[in-house]
Amino acid sequence: MIRREALGQHVAPPVARLLARSCRIREILSDGTVVRHKRTLGNEIYILWHSTLLLLGLANRDQGGVILISRHRDGEILTRAMTRLGYGTARGSSTRGGPVGLREMIRAGQAGRPLGMTPDGPTGPPRECKPGPVYLAAETGLMIVPCAAAATRSKRFDSWDRFVLPLPGATIYCSYGEPVSLDPLDRSVDHVAGWQAELTRQIDAQLARCEAMAAQS
């Protein structure tokens, strides 16, 4: 009998490319204008909720970004899908392989590549930023960009994060906040916790913009 994880690992890559060809990608600018998505990723740390990983992965494919993905079982499915979309992956999380994954991300950042993190992964709580992006920014000196996405037509899985799978032909709306610069010298508990709360607020603000646009389209 074929296990669900094994089936997902084989199905995920072709599905990712199918969605890349069929979905329309749009970006909501800071003034609310909606344009065709053509953002070029920079050497920054892009943070997004785990549920929107595929949406933003489709939008920014084939730009050489490196994404931190957990070593949990579902992480292998995501790794294969994101690799098919042109991403590199670092494997680790807050619960498994964290130091190894963080070191890989640091090296990728030092090499000038865009970095992606889902700071509420790999098991939640959903939409609560863990300290990973703060530590990564402190180690690399890179700025953090809060971002989000929503689709006009999608399926939400019954998972801890309510993972979003866009349906073929959907329009995906993406929104990016202003780059945030952190003080790399201050790693006190209060400083880190304060930034966790602020980054949570900023990602949620970007998500609200995307969901509102998708709902009215």
Image (cartoon, rainbow, N blue to C red):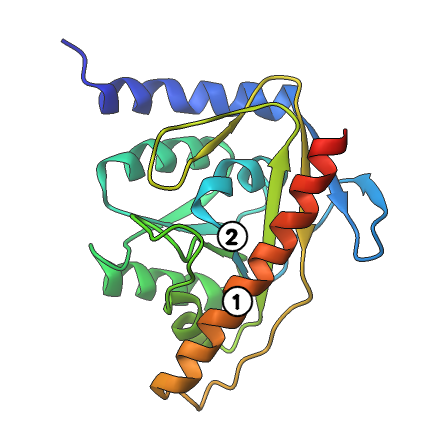
Percent coordinates x, y for residue 160 in the rendering = 33, 40
Q: Residues within 10 Å of mark 2 (few under 14, many from 20)?
A: many
Q: Residues within 10 Å of mark 1 (few under 14, many from 20)?
A: many
User: Percent position (x, y) of residue 152?
Assistant: 66, 27
Residue plotted at (83% across, 41% down): 35
- Name the disc covering residue 48, or none: 2
Q: Is residue 44 visible?
A: no
Disc 2 from disc 1: Cα separation: 10 Å
Element class at badge 2: loop
Please tell me which of labels 2 and 1 falls first in the chain.
2
In the image, what residue occupies the spot 24% across and 25% down? 5
Q: Tag 1, which secondary structure?
A: helix
Query: Residue at 21% across / 57% down in the picture?
Result: 95
Q: Looking at the rendered structure, which numbered label has been put on residue 119?
A: none
Indicate the quadrant containing the C terminus: top left, top right, bottom left or bottom right: top right
Residue 207, how many percent across, how many down? 61, 49
Look at label 1 and name its amino acid: Leu
Q: Is residue 1 left or right of residue 210?
A: left
Quarter of the rendering containing residue 170: top right
Is residue 77 shown left or right of residue 198?
Answer: left
Query: What x and y, as percent, mark residue 106?
Result: 40, 67
Residue at which label 1 appears: 199
Residue 48 as seen in the image, left or right of residue 36:
left
Q: Can residue 76 be seen? A: yes
The amino acid beneath tag 2 is Leu
Query: Which quadrant of the structure image shows residue 167?
Result: top right
